[in-house]
Image: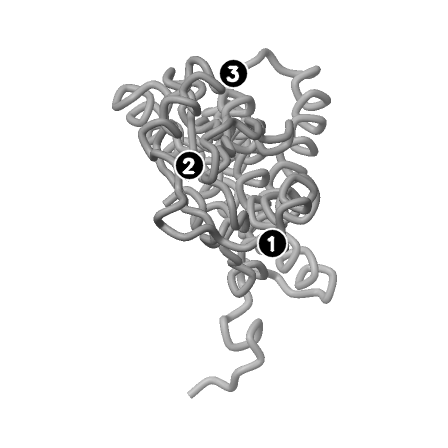
């Protein structure tokens, strides 16, 4: 249900979420640094150049730069929204201990009314629909439920359009009288979180957008693989340079001389 999803404690999983958020931040930082370096690199070559007639390392470098530049905007959006999504636990916790606590404070010590003294549930639904026009009611919590109000129906409403479908607005209806207490839209940081979540997973455009996201994921994997190839090649070049500095002839020296192993 919506109350459990957004308000039940999930702190045992917080370290893992924060770690993933940190990785998302590192990913975005790497994209920014790569874009800065690529801008300086492209001053010497036309955009999209792949030098196939030179050393293989240069070919891998050009492919790495080209694929990275082509997917830079998409990768930045996915990386940043992924970082924001991993902050959902502390952000919802912040809402709970600030706005929600302030809203419920006047009713915290009131007794829970008995079933015989509860107003009509259907009337509460109708009241919530009027209090949040353009939204649809998706759930209801009775007085004394985990949300925290002992005397209110808490009705969960969300937007009816694809863009607003993840924006929840809780509506409090006094269960004793059936009167509206208030509708409380989520603060800006939670609205940003909920809007960015489907953008991260490619849910806004249905199956076509998900296919596009999958193809871009494959390209991003290509950027990663080419980066690893370049990194491995750089380590090899550095090792060869050190061996030559020690006086080894890499073309003539036997393997045993380079590795320090005795010939058998």
Label pair 2/3, CB-CB below 8 angstroms: no
Camera-near label (3 vs 1) is 1
Residue 123 pos. (x, y %): 36, 27
Camera-near label (2 vs 3) is 2
| Quarter of the rendering containing residue 264 | bottom left
Q: Secondary structure at mark 3?
A: loop
Give the residue furthest to the front: 116
Closer-to-camera residue (70/190)? 190
Q: Is residue 238 left or right of residue 9?
A: right
Q: Residues within 10 Å of mark 1 (few under 14, many from 20)?
A: some
* Residue to which mark 2 is pinned: 222
Residue 66 pos. (x, y %): 51, 23
The disc placed on residue 18 is 1
Q: Earlier in the sequence, mark 1 or mark 2?
A: 1
* Residue to which mark 3 is pinned: 48
Quadrant (top left, top right, bottom left, bottom right) of the N terminus: top left
Tell me the distance, in whole angstroms, between the alpha carbons under discs 1 and 2.
27 Å
Camera-near label (1 vs 2) is 1
Label pair 3/1, CB-CB below 8 angstroms: no
Q: Residue at x 39, y 30 (%)?
A: 124
Q: Residues within 10 Å of mark 2 (few under 14, many from 20)?
A: some
Above or below — where is 235 with respect to 59? below
Residue 172 pos. (x, y %): 51, 34
Q: Is residue 109 left or right of residue 232?
A: right
Q: Earlier in the sequence, mark 2 or mark 3?
A: 3
Q: Residue at x 58, y 30 (%)?
A: 186
The disc placed on residue 8 is none
């Amino acid at each position: 249900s919506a109350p459990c999803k957004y308000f039940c404690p999930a702190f045992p999983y917080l370290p893992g979420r924060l770690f993933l958020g940190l990785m998302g931040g590192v990913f975005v930082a790497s994209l920014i640094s790569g874009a800065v370096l690529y801008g300086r690199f492209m001053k010497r070559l036309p955009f999209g150049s792949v030098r196939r007639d030179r050393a293989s390392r240069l070919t891998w470098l050009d492919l790495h730069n080209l694929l990275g530049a082509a997917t830079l905007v998409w990768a930045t959006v996915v990386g940043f929204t992924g970082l924001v999504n991993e902050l959902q636990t502390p952000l919802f916790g912040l809402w709970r201990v600030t706005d929600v606590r302030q809203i419920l404070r006047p009713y915290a010590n009131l007794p829970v009314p008995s079933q015989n003294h509860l107003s009509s549930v259907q009337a509460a639904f109708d009241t919530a629909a009027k209090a949040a026009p353009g939204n649809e009611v998706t759930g209801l919590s009775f007085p004394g439920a985990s949300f925290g109000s002992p005397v209110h129906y808490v009705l969960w409403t969300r937007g009816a359009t694809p863009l607003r479908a993840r924006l929840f607005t809780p509506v409090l209806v006094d269960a004793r009288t059936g009167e509206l207490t208030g509708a409380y839209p989520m603060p800006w940081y939670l609205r940003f979180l909920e809007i960015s979540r489907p953008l991260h997973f490619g849910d806004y455009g249905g199956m076509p957008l998900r296919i596009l996201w999958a193809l871009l994921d494959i390209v991003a994997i290509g950027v990663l693989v080419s980066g690893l190839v370049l990194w491995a090649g750089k380590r090899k070049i550095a090792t060869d340079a050190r061996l030559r500095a020690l006086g080894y002839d890499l073309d003539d020296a036997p393997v045993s001389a380079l590795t320090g192993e005795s010939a058998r």
